[in-house]
């Protein structure tokens, strides 16, 4: 496993670098990839991000300046905030087994790169990327802005339990570069489309509660998305709704991606290790935030998921 200094030295020795982000890209993977690309370009390197077909309108502005043209032929492949090759987008499938450097922060990280660096205690991969970028050179506003996106989104604007003093220290250092962090906060945390609010209302209405009200199941079937003409952007971070409900310490958001295929997001307190639940179904994540995919009808997927929670949960 590489250190930050070793990672920076490796990156300095490379050129023509392509950076990968994961399926259903969130602010952390996009922010890390964009920041790393900016840092590498600052060193005079040719660096680009592999276009991600699932990019949302909110994250797109931070990604767009670095998207690779069709003509780009990389010599080195780097991944950011990807714990397993299972999370590669379709157009990244040819790079399986070919990643030269994997940068991540998930405890479930599978070390699939030829070289790897991981910091599982970090709330966001952006915290690790900040240290790597600082080892490469000065943190410019062009680097700081996407890094702020990365750190703020993976901590729920610093409200999630994974937030640490170091998280705040990194955010403060990024803010001191003069970035417009208020615009980031407004876009990601203080603005919801009408459709998004309708989705949340429907989720609350359909919510089911188990284990004395401590476990909430919140379904988002395809029929609901279609009835509201909801986009992937409208469905971003729907998993943050369940934990707001009083008495709930394990929120299970079940979003149907295609018929009988459910994307599971687990958000939990100390009683339920979200990673251990998701590992039962081939997924992973963090102790209090994990994800996986389960196939079957809603009733079948819900039954399997609740059984998994019961297997892992403490009293």
Image (cartoon, helix red, strand yellow):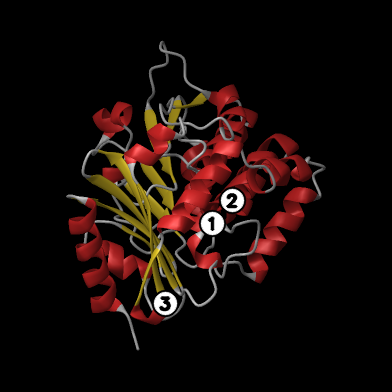
Mark 3 residue element:
helix
- Which image quarter holds the N terminus? bottom left
Categorize mark 1 by other alpha carbons within 10 Å: few (<14), some (14-19), many (20+).
many
Locate residue 121 relative to residue 184 in the image: left or right: left
**Can you identify the residue that label 2 sits on?**
153
Residue ID at (65%, 56%): 157
The mark found on residue 227 in the picture is: none
Residue ID at (41%, 37%): 225
Q: Are marks 2 and 1 in contact (CB under 8 Å)?
A: yes
**Can you identify the residue that label 3 sits on?**
213
Q: Earlier in the sequence, mark 1 or mark 3?
A: 1
Horizontal and vertical percent position of residue 206: 40, 56
Q: Nearer the viewer, residue 297 or 40?
A: 297
Categorize mark 2 by other alpha carbons within 10 Å: few (<14), some (14-19), many (20+).
many
Mark 2 residue element:
helix
**Can you identify the residue that label 1 sits on?**
124
């Amino acid at each position: 496993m590489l250190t930050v200094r070793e990672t920076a030295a490796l990156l300095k020795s490379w050129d023509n670098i392509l950076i990968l982000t994961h399926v259903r890209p969130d602010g952390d993977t996009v922010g890390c990839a964009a920041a790393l690309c900016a840092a590498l370009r600052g060193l005079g390197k040719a660096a680009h991000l592999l276009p991600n077909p699932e990019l949302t309108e909110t994250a797109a502005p931070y990604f767009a300046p670095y998207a690779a043209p069709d003509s780009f032929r990389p010599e080195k492949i780097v991944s950011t905030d990807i714990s397993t090759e299972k999370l590669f987008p379709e157009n990244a499938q040819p790079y399986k087994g070919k990643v030269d450097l994997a940068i991540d922060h998930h405890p479930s990280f599978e070390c699939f790169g030829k070289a790897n660096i991981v910091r599982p205690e970090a709330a966001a991969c952006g915290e690790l990327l900040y240290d790597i970028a600082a080892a490469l050179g000065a943190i410019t506003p062009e680097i700081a802005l996407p890094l702020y996106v990365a750190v703020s989104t993976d901590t729920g604007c610093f409200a999630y339990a994974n937030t640490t003093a170091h998280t705040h220290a990194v955010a403060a250092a990024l803010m001191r570069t003069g970035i417009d962090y208020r615009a980031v906060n407004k876009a990601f945390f203080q603005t919801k489309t009408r459709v998004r609010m309708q989705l949340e209302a429907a989720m609350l209405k359909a919510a089911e509660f188990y284990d004395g009200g401590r476990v909430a199941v919140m379904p988002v079937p395809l029929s609901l998305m279609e009835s509201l003409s909801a986009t992937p952007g409208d469905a971003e971070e729907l998993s943050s709704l369940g934990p707001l409900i009083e008495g709930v310490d394990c929120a299970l958001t079940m979003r149907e991606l295609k018929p009988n295929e459910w994307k599971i997001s687990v958000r939990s307190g100390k009683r339920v290790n979200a990673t251990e639940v998701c590992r039962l179904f081939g997924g992973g994540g963090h102790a209090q935030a994990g994800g996986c995919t389960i196939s079957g009808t809603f009733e079948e997927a819900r039954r399997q998921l609740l059984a998994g929670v019961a297997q892992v949960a403490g009293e």
